[in-house]
Amino acid sequence: MPWIQVILETDQSVYEQAEQALLDTGALSVTFKDAEDNPVLEPAPGETPLWDTLVLTGLYEADIDTGALRQQLQQQLGNHPVKIEALEDRDWVRAWMDSYKPMQFGQRLWVCPRHLSPPEPDAVNLMLDPGLAFGTGTHPTTALCLQWLDQNNIDDRQVLDYGCGSGVLAIAALLLGANHCDAVDIDPQALEATQNNAKDNQVLNRLDIMLPEKLSTQQYDIVLANILAGPLVELAPVLAGFTRHGGQIALSGILNTQSDEIIATYSKWFKLDDKVVSEDWVRITGVKI
């Protein structure tokens, strides 16, 4: 059935009042969105950070009296602008999947949704649908890592994907010629997604999937870590220890403003390449010295 949604733009000082007004007038749910596309990353423990300006969206049943609804909201919020519009019922998961198109990374590698035929059947085609775990190639951090994998010769390499999400980097490495990959994540859903995606891409026999504490002390030819800057700093000795002498590391999930700290930290163990930037996100790579 169709729905009615009410959209309010507000700021931190009155968002609680606006949220309560939506709930008091019968909203079935209220969602928050940044009004200016400013990311909030790595909050401190116990913090619930909010953007300076927010868009609140309340979802209502379609038979609600929109005139009375607008009047009630204005009584509670004064002359605050209120936008009311119809929202057609859709299969939102299917709609997202339909908008997810094949993407090329470098010369050889494509990431394609399962329901579509690869544009280049003879290329290296990783078949993947968006799901619960992060990582389909649509985000710049994942794209930067996939491009790096495509650009490097990883034939017969031993690879570690630390913070594997959907497993896209591990699977790409195996499809591009790696001998074996270990994929770790702290999220059980990520491990499940990685297993399912690896099975669908017929590389599960060359992939071990586990929680970080189950990882052995072996060293790898290539270490991939597409996580966030804070954990990357904390994990630097661990990731360096997993990289063999002469091995390569590829780090992402880093904002450009955070790159100097990452470079300073990892320079203790690696000869680093020039950073690569895409949409304010950074990839840092290097060789263990």
Image (spheres, rainbow, N blue to C red):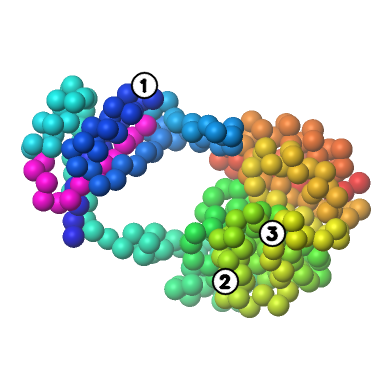
Residue 258 point in image, percent of width and height = 66, 33
Element on which disc 2 rests:
helix
Q: Is residue 188 above or below residue 230?
A: below
Q: Is the residue marked by circle 1 packed among few (<14), some (14-19), or many (20+) residues within 10 Å?
A: few
What whole-number distance in Å separates the C-alpha atoms at marks 1 and 3? 41 Å
Name the foreground residue: 91 vs 65. 65
Q: Is residue 259 above or below residue 173?
A: above
Residue at 64%, 54% in the rendered image = 186
Query: Which numbered mark, 2 or 3, is in the foreground of this view?
Result: 3
Residue 241 point in image, percent of width and height = 86, 50
Q: Which residue is mark 3?
A: 211
Q: Which residue is mark 1?
A: 13
- Indicate which disc, 2 or 1, sits on the residue closer to the N terminus: 1
Quarter assignment of residue 133:
bottom right
- Indicate which disc, 2 or 3, sits on the residue closer to the N terminus: 2
Residue 112 point in image, percent of width and height = 52, 67
Name the foreground residue: 219 vs 26. 26
Residue at 81%, 47% in the rendered image = 238
Q: Is residue 55 above or below residue 115?
A: above
Amino acid type of the residue that numbered disc 1 sits on in the rendered structure: Ser
Q: Is residue 30 magenta?
A: no
What whole-number distance in Å separates the C-alpha atoms at marks 2 and 1? 44 Å
Q: Is residue 61 magenta?
A: yes
Residue stretch in magenta: 54-66
Element on which disc 3 rests:
loop
Amino acid type of the residue that numbered disc 3 sits on in the rendered structure: Leu
What whole-number distance in Å separates the C-alpha atoms at marks 2 and 3? 16 Å
